[in-house]
């Protein structure tokens, strides 16, 4: 049996028995899908808000037809208590409709009859209700106006020179798309965190517990030891990545994305494409983690090195979010960045070009080899093996 | 047979090993005796090829170790200063892992593992995880791990450190057996009694140099002292770092 197979099998057995870190990895893997699902459900509950708009009416007796129109249109009309203004200002009530004392007189004379709609424009939560109310009031005005025109023998259509067809591009759609763009980030984090503990334990842990020296005293070649350990880290990262991808795959269909008007899917083809795009990255991040873990003076130091490294997957996402222009093609070669762009393309349903795919894969593979070679090189250094 | 020829090793400005030469013969136990910090561990690490000498060479059974470290390692069984185990692996799995890394497979591997577990009285804990082992049990597993490939040369760095009397006796018996089997055994210690009780030859190291070499009787005779301890004190100039 080759040395790397022996090491790989031992590392997997060893880590499979570490219940605590396995559970942590599992929970960590499902955190992303759970987080996204929760956000979607929350947004869907906002979007599906069919509560009738509520309004407090002051002096409704002067405008009975208006009040009954509002009721018929579906508004929840309530007589206003004395402190209605305070209630609206404090956001307890969405709006109050004040019918002026001249309303009835103006109305019958055919001049604009004034009502005041008290609302708080800074209160995002209530704006939807206020908007609906305002539309109802406008519709009432239009209907009455049309009736008046008809009574004078005029076609009311003459009064409507322009017809506006409203196309609702609600912001909830954008937010949903933003959440979808988090999926690549969560997948990347899963790939990164899944093997993190194993990588720290395999090198810094090995030295700290005093088993590195005996291991190096065997005739097994250093590259084989490194590759065996690296494969174990990759395997654990891959397991974590698969669990996260499966979580998204099963969670997304239950989230009724259509309700939010989002065009996004995460079918098997896409899942497979993303996993393929991420595999080279997984290889690279495992090599990088191993290398840092070997370089670190202690287990603790390795932990802090690798944890700082966790930031790496989040940086490209931030850049992509802030950058106003499409990134240059050569940037695909940058690990994390390239994969994230690929995954975003795949999730949006855009075909990824072969050039960008090759660049992303090539960059990660080259850096993986470099990282592994450097790790083996470090293990030849007495100061690394026996501590500094 | 293990030969050290004029080994030199510096760490920065400090000369840890300064021209150490000695020969450890087959079928004999050679003790490397010296106070703490004398250069014993560094010398053993150079013999085990993990530390490169700045000058001099190491011959394992006549072959230069630097030329082919893997071949040298295969002929060496080393209990190094670091004696760590994997807490989640059993005693048997430790031996199997290192046996496989030494190239053992199939029935030969399981025979060797069983033989060592029996010989070191480890059968009772063979399938228990190392996390709960006592100091003595840990040391025995480490020694068994070093012997798994049946090496003709055995080097042990402080093999009795921190052990109880019963385990020390077992360890001494094992060393005597290894000698009887014709192996070349080197062990280092700063415990005088260990060395005088077991060794055929003693190499006394102080401040990175060999200050005396020979059988216990020869060393006593040369220094004109009746006890090995007095001889040792006279040779290294002080009793510092020496344990009873």
Image (cartoon, grey):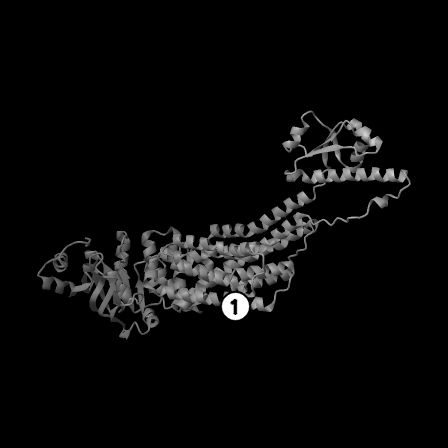
Residue at image mark 1:
A362
Left or right, residue A201 beside residue A323: left
Visible residue check, residue B100 = no
Q: Residue at 45% across / 61% down in the picture?
A: A288
Residue A349 spot, x, y in % from top left: 65, 60
Q: Residue at 61% across / 67% down in the picture?
A: A353
Residue B127 spot, x, y in % from top left: 41, 56
Visible residue check, residue A242 = yes
> How would you rate the neighbour count of disc 1 (Cα within 10 Å): few for under 14, some for 14-19, many for 20 or more?
some
Left or right, residue B151 beside residue B218: right
Work out which quarter of the rendered image holds the N terminus of chain A and state it: bottom left
In the picture, residue B74 is in which quadrant? bottom left
Question: Is residue A302 placed above or below A120 in the rendered structure?
Answer: below
Q: Which of B121 and A137 is in front in this view?
A: A137
Question: Mark 1 falls on what kind of element?
Answer: helix
The chain that hosts pointer 1 is A
- Of all residues, the one furthest to the right in this rendering is A153
Residue A25 spot, x, y in % from top left: 51, 52
């Amino acid at each position: 049996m080759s040395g790397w197979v022996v090491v790989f099998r031992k590392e997997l057995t060893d880590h499979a028995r570490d219940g605590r870190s396995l559970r942590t990895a599992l929970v960590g893997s499902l955190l992303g899908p759970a987080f996204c699902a929760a956000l979607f459900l929350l947004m869907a509950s906002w979007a599906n808000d069919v509560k009738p708009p509520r309004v407090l009416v002051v002096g409704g007796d002067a405008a009975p037809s208006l009040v009954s129109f509002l009721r018929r249109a579906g508004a929840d009309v309530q007589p206003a208590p004395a402190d209605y203004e305070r209630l609206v200002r404090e956001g307890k009530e969405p709006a109050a409709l004040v019918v002026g004392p001249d309303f009835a007189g103006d109305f019958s004379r055919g001049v604009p009859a004034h009502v005041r709609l008290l609302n708080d424009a800074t209160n995002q939560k209530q704006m939807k209700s206020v908007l609906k109310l305002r539309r109802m009031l406008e519709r009432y005005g239009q209907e009455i106006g049309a009736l008046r025109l008809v009574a004078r023998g005029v076609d009311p259509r003459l009064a409507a020179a322009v017809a506006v067809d409203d196309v609702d591009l609600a912001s909830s759609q954008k937010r949903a798309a933003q959440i979808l763009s988090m999926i690549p980030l969560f997948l990347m984090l899963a790939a990164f965190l899944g093997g993190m503990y194993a990588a720290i334990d395999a090198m810094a842990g090995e030295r700290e517990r005093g088993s590195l020296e005996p291991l190096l005293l065997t005739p097994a070649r250093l590259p084989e030891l490194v590759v065996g350990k690296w494969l174990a880290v990759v395997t654990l990262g891959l397991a974590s990545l698969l669990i996260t991808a499966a979580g998204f795959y099963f969670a997304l269909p239950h989230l009724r994305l259509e309700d939010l008007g989002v065009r996004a899917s995460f079918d098997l083809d896409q899942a497979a494409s993303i996993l393929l795009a991420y595999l080279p990255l997984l290889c690279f991040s495992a090599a990088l983690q191993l290398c840092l873990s070997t370089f670190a003076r202690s287990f603790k130091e390795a932990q802090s090195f690798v944890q700082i490294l966790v930031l790496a997957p989040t940086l490209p996402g931030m850049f992509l979010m802030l950058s106003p222009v499409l990134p240059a093609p050569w940037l695909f070669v940058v690990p994390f960045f390239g994969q994230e762009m690929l995954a975003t393309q795949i999730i949006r349903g855009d075909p990824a070009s072969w050039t960008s795919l090759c660049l992303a894969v090539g960059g990660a593979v080259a850096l993986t080899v470099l990282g592994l070679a450097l790790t083996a090189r470090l293990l030849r250094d007495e100061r690394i093996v026996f501590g500094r | 047979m293990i030969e050290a020829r004029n080994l030199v090793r510096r760490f920065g400005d400090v000369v840890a090993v300064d021209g150490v030469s000695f020969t450890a013969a087959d079928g004999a136990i050679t003790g490397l005796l010296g106070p703490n910090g004398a250069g014993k561990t560094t010398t053993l690490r150079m013999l085990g090829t993990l530390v490169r000498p700045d000058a001099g060479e190491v011959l394992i059974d006549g072959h230069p170790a630097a030329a082919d470290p893997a071949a040298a390692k295969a002929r060496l069984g080393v209990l190094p200063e670091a004696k760590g185990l994997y807490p989640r692996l059993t005693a048997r799995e430790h031996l199997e892992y290192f046996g496989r890394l030494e190239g053992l497979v199939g029935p030969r591997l399981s025979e060797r593992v069983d033989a060592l577990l029996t010989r070191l009285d480890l059968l009772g804990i063979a399938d228990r995880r190392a996390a709960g082992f006592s100091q003595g049990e840990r040391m025995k597993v480490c020694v068994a791990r070093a012997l798994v490939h049946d090496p003709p040369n055995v080097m042990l760095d402080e093999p009795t450190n921190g052990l109880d009397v019963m385990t020390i006796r077992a360890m001494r018996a094992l060393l005597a057996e290894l000698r009887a089997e014709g192996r070349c055994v080197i062990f280092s210690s700063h415990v005088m009694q260990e060395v005088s009780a077991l060794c055929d030859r003693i190499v006394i190291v102080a401040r990175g140099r060999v200050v005396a070499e020979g059988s216990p009787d020869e060393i006593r005779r040369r220094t004109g002292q009746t006890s090995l301890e007095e001889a040792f004190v006279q040779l290294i100039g002080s009793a510092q770092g020496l344990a009873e």
